[in-house]
Image (tube, rainbow, N blue to C red):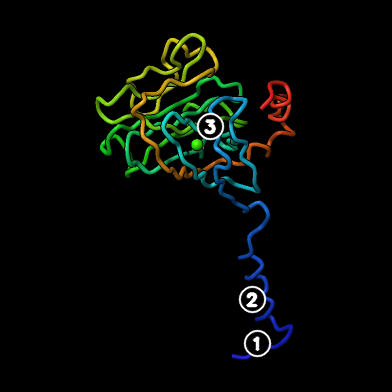
């Protein structure tokens, strides 16, 4: 069928095409770790990009813990998940490094659909957060990786599934990590919902990431 110039049929087609084009608010991006992400508040990698953050890809090596600054735009839709291929830990801290939630799976039976998940259930409000990813040794090869504050472990070492901080160091901020020498390395691909760039909400934050970096250094 020939559609004449300016005919109602071509108008409909044009409207349809416009509706199918992505709007700026539909933009999404993924982040690749480069260089190696740090493991503390002042060295966490700042994730930057347009629109929604959909994944972070990177690697942890033995004695390596990766931490990223992201914005959580909607705790009710937030999720972070990573395919399981060995004991896996996901961590969430506020922008000062206080523990919010962590989850650990040591066997495939402890996953959901083969993935290790964090939800927004324990997140108090939208804002800037630090998400961490680590590995732990299998079986009796060594103790699980722990996030540590001045008062000790922020979470107890033995927990599985999603938990609020429950260790002796729960009330204080992250200062270091403890890890077994037998912790293996691994390439990861964390998928997200409800998230955006670390710098997306900086203008709205009383304490911005750039101010923190200027205060504490890299
Ligand atoms: Ca790394």
Q: Please identify the residue farthest to the bottom as the structure is shown.
A: 2
Q: Secondary structure at mark 1?
A: loop
Mark 3–mark 1 contact, CB under 8 Å? no
Sequence-wise, which precedes: disc 2 or disc 3?
Answer: 2
Q: Which residue is mark 3?
A: 67
What's the distance in space between the residues labelled 2 and 3, CA to CA?
47 Å
Numbered disc in front, either 3 or 1: 3
For the point 74% across and 34% down, which residue is it? 203
Q: Secondary structure at mark 2?
A: helix
Q: Quadrant of the N terminus?
A: bottom right
Q: Secondary structure at mark 3?
A: strand
Sequence-wise, which precedes: disc 1 or disc 2?
Answer: 1
Left or right: 20 as drawn, with respect to 135:
right
Q: Which residue occupies the foreground of this view, 62 or 213?
A: 62
Mark 1–mark 2 contact, CB under 8 Å? yes
Is the residue 166 above or below the residue 129 in the image? above
Q: Which residue occupies the foreground of this view, 186 or 99?
A: 186
For the point 53% across and 32% down, which residue is it? 67
Q: Dot 3: few (<14), some (14–19), or many (≥20) neighbours within 10 Å?
A: many
Q: Which residue is mark 1?
A: 3
Is the residue 33 above or below the residue 211 in the image? below
Q: Quadrant of the C terminus?
A: top right
Q: Position of residue 186 (x, y in %)?
A: 40, 40
Choose top left, top right, bottom left or bottom right for residue 119.
top left
Q: Position of residue 162 (x, y in %)?
A: 39, 28
Is the residue 9 above or below the residue 106 in the image? below
Sequence-wise, which precedes: disc 3 or disc 1?
Answer: 1
For the point 47% across and 45% down, which residue is it? 191
Residue 13's label in the rendered image is 2
């Amino acid at each position: 069928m020939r559609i004449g110039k300016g005919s109602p049929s071509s108008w409909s087609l044009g409207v349809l095409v416009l509706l199918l084009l992505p709007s700026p608010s539909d933009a999404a991006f993924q982040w690749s770790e480069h260089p190696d992400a740090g493991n503390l508040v002042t060295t966490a990698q700042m994730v930057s990009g347009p629109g929604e953050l959909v994944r972070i890809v990177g690697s942890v090596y033995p004695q390596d813990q990766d931490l990223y600054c992201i914005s959580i735009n909607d705790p009710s839709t937030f999720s972070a998940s990573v395919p399981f291929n060995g004991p896996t830990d996901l961590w969430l801290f506020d922008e000062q490094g206080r523990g919010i939630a962590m989850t650990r799976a040591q066997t495939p039976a402890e996953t959901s659909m083969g993935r290790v998940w964090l939800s927004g259930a324990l997140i108090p409000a939208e804002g800037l957060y630090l998400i961490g990813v680590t590995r732990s040794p299998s079986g009796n090869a060594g103790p699980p990786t722990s996030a540590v504050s001045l008062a000790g472990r922020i979470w107890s070492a033995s927990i599985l599934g999603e938990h609020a901080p429950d260790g002796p160091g729960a009330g204080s901020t992250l200062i270091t990590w403890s890890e077994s020498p037998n912790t293996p390395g691994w390439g990861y691909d964390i998928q997200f919902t409800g998230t955006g760039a670390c710098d997306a909400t900086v203008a709205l934050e009383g304490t911005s990431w750039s101010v923190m970096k200027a205060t504490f250094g890299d």
